[in-house]
Image: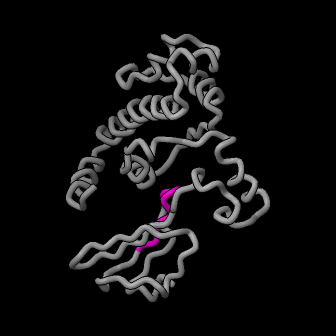
């Protein structure tokens, strides 16, 4: 999303009625799209998901329809259990909400099942670095380093990067972002302050 688009969105979000509509639209649209994406990731039909979730194919079809708009926690919990993924329903600040919906690619909507990410959870439980023990398909690089200024420069980083080795073409502010958690880890100006 461009800076101009972000500024336009912020201007609209200053209106409470728009904030209400924005939240409802994103939840009612993105949840069905993510369910469909994860179902297709499993290579399941709606009928297969319905059988696993102990519901009907019609119920799955309605849940995957962004125009339906009547999602229930019980159905979402059944579907999450069938897909063997977690379900997070959480009140968040708008700064988090807008970041959550910036990337709507199928990759960002896909979610590994418990068994696909068990090595990540094992590393978490042991308090070790998940990149040393996790299956490569279960994790994605989670840090993005961005430098602004006259030129915008962005670099995807492996999890084991070292800041002193990076060379940015512009001296603008540097933002290190944890993409999985959707938040900035540090902001520095210039680069040396982010170390």
Percent of width and height locating residue 167 = 38, 85
Q: Is residue 60 above or below residue 145?
A: above
State the quadrant of the N terminus. bottom left
Q: Is residue 177 magenta?
A: yes
Q: Is residue 186 above or below residue 78?
A: below
Which is more toward the observer, 92 or 38? 38
Q: Which residues are magenta?
A: 175-182
Q: Is residue 29 magenta?
A: no
Percent of width and height locating residue 21 = 33, 35
Residue 51: quadrant of the picture: top right
State the residue at coordinates (51%, 12%). Answer: 57
Residue 87 as seen in the image, left or right of residue 145: right
State the residue at coordinates (31%, 73%). Answer: 153
Residue 32: quadrant of the picture: top left
Which is more toward the observer, 195 or 7? 195
Which is more toward the observer, 44 or 91? 44
Residue 49 as seen in the image, left or right of residue 65: right
């Amino acid at each position: 999303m461009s800076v101009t688009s972000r500024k336009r969105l912020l201007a609209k979000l200053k209106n409470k009625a728009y904030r209400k509509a924005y939240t409802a639209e994103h939840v009612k649209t993105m949840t069905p799209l993510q369910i469909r994406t994860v179902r297709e990731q499993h290579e399941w039909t709606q009928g297969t998901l319905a059988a696993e979730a102990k519901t009907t194919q019609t119920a799955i079809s309605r849940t995957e329809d962004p125009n339906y708009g009547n999602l229930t926690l019980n159905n979402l919990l059944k579907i999450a259990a069938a897909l063997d993924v977690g379900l997070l329903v959480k009140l968040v600040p708008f700064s988090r909400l807008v970041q959550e919906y910036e990337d709507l690619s199928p990759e960002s909507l896909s979610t590994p099942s418990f068994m696909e990410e068990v090595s990540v959870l094992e590393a978490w439980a042991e308090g070790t670095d998940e990149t040393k023990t996790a299956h490569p398909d279960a994790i994605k690089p989670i840090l993005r380093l961005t430098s602004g200024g006259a030129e915008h420069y962005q670099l995807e980083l492996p999890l084991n990067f070292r800041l002193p080795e990076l060379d940015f073409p512009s001296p603008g502010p540097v933002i290190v972002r944890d993409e999985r958690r959707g938040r900035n880890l540090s902001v520095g100006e210039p680069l040396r302050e982010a170390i």
